[in-house]
Image (cartoon, rainbow, N blue to C red):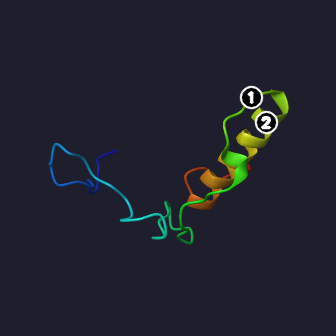
Amino acid sequence: MAVGEYIGNGNPDGSSFGKDTSEAVSFYGVTPVAQRANASQAVATDAASVIVLANELRAALVALGAIKGSA
């Protein structure tokens, strides 16, 4: 499959989506959302906090449209 369009301008500094944390972005046509921030994103220090972090990361990726989240 050929690429329809590239995002970027060839600048070696790279590209960014959203100018600040309150600007909403999304993928695959889902409703754009601002950057998530909550205590569930803290460093995981035990098994229980790893599960909490994994669930938060999943929720963030689903909200962005980066993953579907279900079959």
Q: Which mark is residue 14?
A: none
Amino acid tagged 1: Thr
> Horizontal and vertical percent for residue 63?
62, 60
Q: Which residue is denoted by mark 1 in the rendering?
A: 45
- Count of labels in the image: 2
**Residue 56 in the image: above or below residue 48:** below
Q: Which residue does the image show at 74% across and 28% down from the upper left?
A: 45
On screen, residue 16 versus residue 35, left or right, reads left
Amino acid tagged 2: Ser
The residue lying furthest to the top in this view is 46
Q: Nearer the viewer, residue 19 or 15?
A: 19
**Residue 31 in the image: above or below residue 37:** below
Answer few, some or many: residues within 10 Å of disc 2's Cα (few below 14, many 20 plus, some between 14 and 19).
some
On screen, residue 71 versus residue 8, left or right, reads right
Q: In which quarter of the image is the N terminus?
A: top left
**Residue 24 in the image: above or below residue 28:** below
Mark 1 falls on what kind of element?
loop
On screen, residue 40 versus residue 23, left or right, reads right
Q: Quadrant of residue 60 in the image?
A: bottom right
Real-space Cα separation, disc 1 to disc 2, in angstroms: 6 Å
Q: Which residue does the image show at 54% across and 67% down from the upper left?
A: 34
Q: Which residue does the image show at 49% across and 70% down from the upper left?
A: 22
Q: Quadrant of residue 53 in the image?
A: top right
Mark 2 falls on what kind of element?
helix
Q: Which residue does the image show at 66% across and 46% down from the upper left?
A: 41
On screen, residue 14 versus residue 37, left or right, reads left
> Horizontal and vertical percent for residue 48?
84, 33
Q: Residue 49 carries which label?
A: 2
Q: Quadrant of residue 51 in the image?
A: top right
Q: Do the residues labelled 1 and 2 touch (CB within 8 Å)?
A: yes
Answer few, some or many: residues within 10 Å of disc 1's Cα (few below 14, many 20 plus, some between 14 and 19).
few
> Horizontal and vertical percent for residue 24?
48, 70
